[in-house]
Amino acid sequence: MIKEWFADYFLHTSDITFDFSGGSNEMTVHNSHSEPWRVTIVDTGLNTMTGGRIKRVQPYVGNEAFMMTYGDGVCDVDIGRLVEFHRVHGKKATLTAVVQQQQKGVLDIGGDNAVRSFREKNASDGALINAGYMVLEPEVFDLLDGDACVFERAPLQTLADTGELMSYTHRGFWQCMDDKREMDMLEKLWATGNAPWKKWE
């Protein structure tokens, strides 16, 4: 479905005349509103874990830093500042941290913004959590081993243990969409024109 959406993207974002009057199907594009995007869609497999999915895009990333997000949350993080923070500290990975009562991956962050440890949620936590917006160097691919690799376990913990995982604290809006209640809330924000993550025109 995602591939089909992008395959038809140009048609959906353009003013077009379809002319069947001459017995043929002629199409005239009058005005295109499409974004200047270059999109690669990778089928990572139905049962592939998070680390395995990241590993499968390696051939398309090349030898440069890249950004990763889980796609189940929205926020108003300043991507430019996040990338600049990553470039300045020179480590292999940066994740965006937010303060949230919901329990996600919990971070232990030192005074120098280095991530000391990374662990899965606990019912008593109310700490900084992994917001899922990351900047990664290509060396991170070396920590990923096959489709069963869970990025949030050994790879992130290894990066933390070796001092290569830094946190960028975001104090603005962030919300995941893990259940119907969260979906309804986010859709209401969008429908009423109050979506804090919509920073484009």
Image: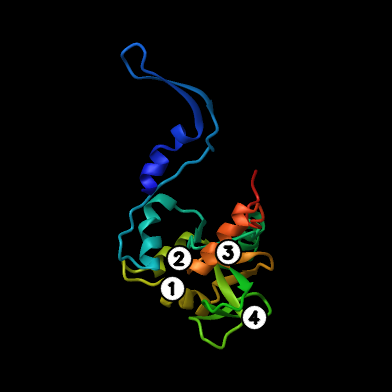
Expressed as whole percent of the image width and height from the top left, the position of residue 105 reads 51, 77
The answer to whether the residues at label 1 and label 3 have Cβ atoms under 8 Å apart is no
Q: Secondary structure at mark 2?
A: helix
* Residue depicted at x 52% and y 63%: 183
Observer-side mark, 1 or 3, equals 3
Q: Residue at x 43, y 77 (%)?
A: 153
Instruction: Label 4, secondary structure: give it.
Output: loop
Q: Nearer the viewer, residue 106 or 138?
A: 106
Q: Is residue 30 left or right of residue 143?
A: right
Which tag, 2 or 4, sits closer to the chain's start?
4
Query: How crowded is the residue under tag 2: few (<14 C-alpha within 10 Å), some, or many (20+)?
Result: some
Q: Callout 3: helix, strand or loop?
A: helix
Residues at badges 1 and 2 in contact (C-beta under 8 Å)?
Answer: yes
- For disc 4, the marked residue is 110
For residue 155, the mark is 1
Q: Which residue is mark 2?
A: 140
Is 15 on the left or on the right of 99, as rendered? left
Residue holding disc 3: 185
Tell me the residue at 44%/32% (across/down). Answer: 11
Where residue 182 sits, quadrant-wise, is: bottom right
Give the image location of residue 24, x and y in percent: 32, 16
N-term mark: 2 or 3:
2
The percent position of residue 110, horizontal first and vertical second, equals 64, 80
Classify 140 as above or below 201.
below
